[in-house]
Every structure is written in C-alpha cells, then in structure tokens.
Amino acid sequence: MEYKELYPNLFDATDMGAWKNRNIRKEFLSYEWDMMVQEVAPDVFEFPFFNKEFCDKFVDVIKTTNWDQVNRWGTPVDSSNLKVFGLDDIMKHLIHDYIFSIVQKEWRLEGQKWKLMQPDNNILKLKEGQEIRMHHDYIHISLYCKLDGYSEGGELIFDKYNKVINPKQGYIYMYPGQITHRYGMRRVSNGDRYFLMSYCTSD
C-alpha cells in the first residue's frame, strides 16, 4: 500500500489551517508560550506539539517505509526524512512561524543569521535494546519529538546538568545543539522508539 492511502488526510495540506487544526495541539497554535513552555533542565524547553492522533497514525505509516541506516554515535539507527512523506515543508513552516518565536522569547537571539536557520527534519528509529551514547550535535538548535506512545526507556540524558528526561509523546524538547548540551539516549527497554529530530542551522 502506498503510504498516502493509509491516512490521506495526514498528508493533505492544501488547506494549511485545516491541516494544523487536525494534527497540531490546540495550545501550541495559540502562541501562549508562557502557559505551555516549560524549562525542564537548564536551556532545555518542553512544549506540546503534535496531537496523539497524528502521532499514532504517522507511526503506522512510517512502519511501512523503507529505511536508510545511519551511524548515530556508535549505533546503527534506521533513518528517513520528512521529505519522503511530503511533510517537510509543513514542518519548516511550523518551525519558522511558531517555534522560532519560542527561540526568540527564551534566548533573545539577534541577527539575520538566526532568522535564516533551516531545519533538517529526520525520522529516526531506535530498536528495542539500542541506545545512543553521549555526544554533541554539530548544529545550532536541536528539536526532539517522540512519536510513538508505547515504547519504554530511551530517556534523554544531559550529563552536565545531571538531568534525565522521559519524553512525552508529541512534545518537543528544544535545546542548544553544540558545546553546552552534550546528551545521549538511554537503551530502549521495550518496543521500538520512533522520533523526529529537527537539526536547525544556518550557513
């Protein structure tokens, strides 16, 4: 089955407003950042993003895809890109029009280069028993979003701050991608972990 046949409304963004209302959490679309953005570790921000229905359906879809395999700090991880599903432009819109306003609110970033940041949106799969060792991302801002609602383990670890975060389905975790925020992912203890990583950087 071609992936768009499974849940066609998931990929129909001819009406962007309708697509957002179907798939994005209502509180996120409100721009009321003071009400929803939580600093769960120093300069690590958590906020709601995709709703449960979108996450569950999208995981059903990505389970049927053909994966590439990439090495993520010593772990061979299954990888794909949102471009494969025709959702990359939507995600870029959401990052530029919404998430970058959170970036400005929390970090007061100045200058044209920050406004020109482009996200590289990747879907990754950590199989049961896999983990990703501690590392730095070589980009400006990292965005992590857990998509499945059933896998266990796979917590985000920020060792400098002695912080362990158990990600919520559909929530984004935003943090600097370079020197200050070395992080890893604990072993997935049950099920496979599907998650979105958006790496935001500028030339």
Image (spheres, helix red, strand yellow):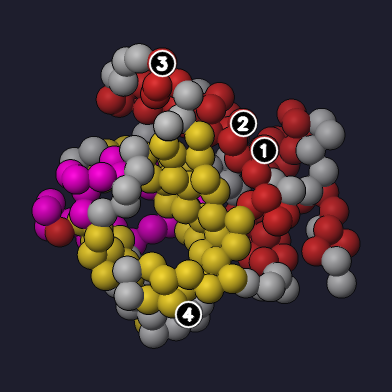
The answer to whether residue 170 is left or right of residue 65 is left
Residue 89: image tag: 1
Residue 127: image tag: 4
Q: Which of marks 4 and 2 is nearer the N terminus?
A: 2
**Nearer the viewer's eye, disc 4 or disc 1?**
1
**Nearer the viewer's eye, disc 3 or disc 4?**
3
- Residue at the spot x=48%, y=42% of the render? 48
Mark 3 lies on residue:
112
As measured in the structure, the alpha-carbon distance from the residue carrying label 4 to the one carrying label 2 is 30 Å
User: Callout 1: helix, strand or loop?
Assistant: helix
- Residue at the spot x=51%, y=40% of the render? 119
Instruction: Report the quarter where the N terminus lies.
Output: bottom right
Give the amino acid at mark 3: Gln
User: Callout 3: helix, strand or loop?
Assistant: helix
**Nearer the viewer's eye, disc 2 or disc 3?**
3
How many numbered tags mark residues here?
4
As measured in the structure, the alpha-carbon distance from the residue carrying label 1 to the one carrying label 2 is 6 Å
The answer to whether residue 86 is left or right of residue 73 is right
As measured in the structure, the alpha-carbon distance from the residue carrying label 3 to the one carrying label 1 is 21 Å
Where residue 72 sits, quadrant-wise, is bottom left
Give the amino acid at mark 4: Lys
- Residue at the spot x=32%, y=69% of the render? 73
Q: Residue 145's spot in the image, x, y percent?
A: 47, 53
As measured in the structure, the alpha-carbon distance from the residue carrying label 2 to the one carrying label 3 is 18 Å
Start-end of magenta stretch: 160-182
The verdict on residue 163 being magenta is yes
Instruction: Report the quarter where the C terminus lies.
Output: top left
14 in relation to 175, above or below = above
Residue 93: image tag: 2
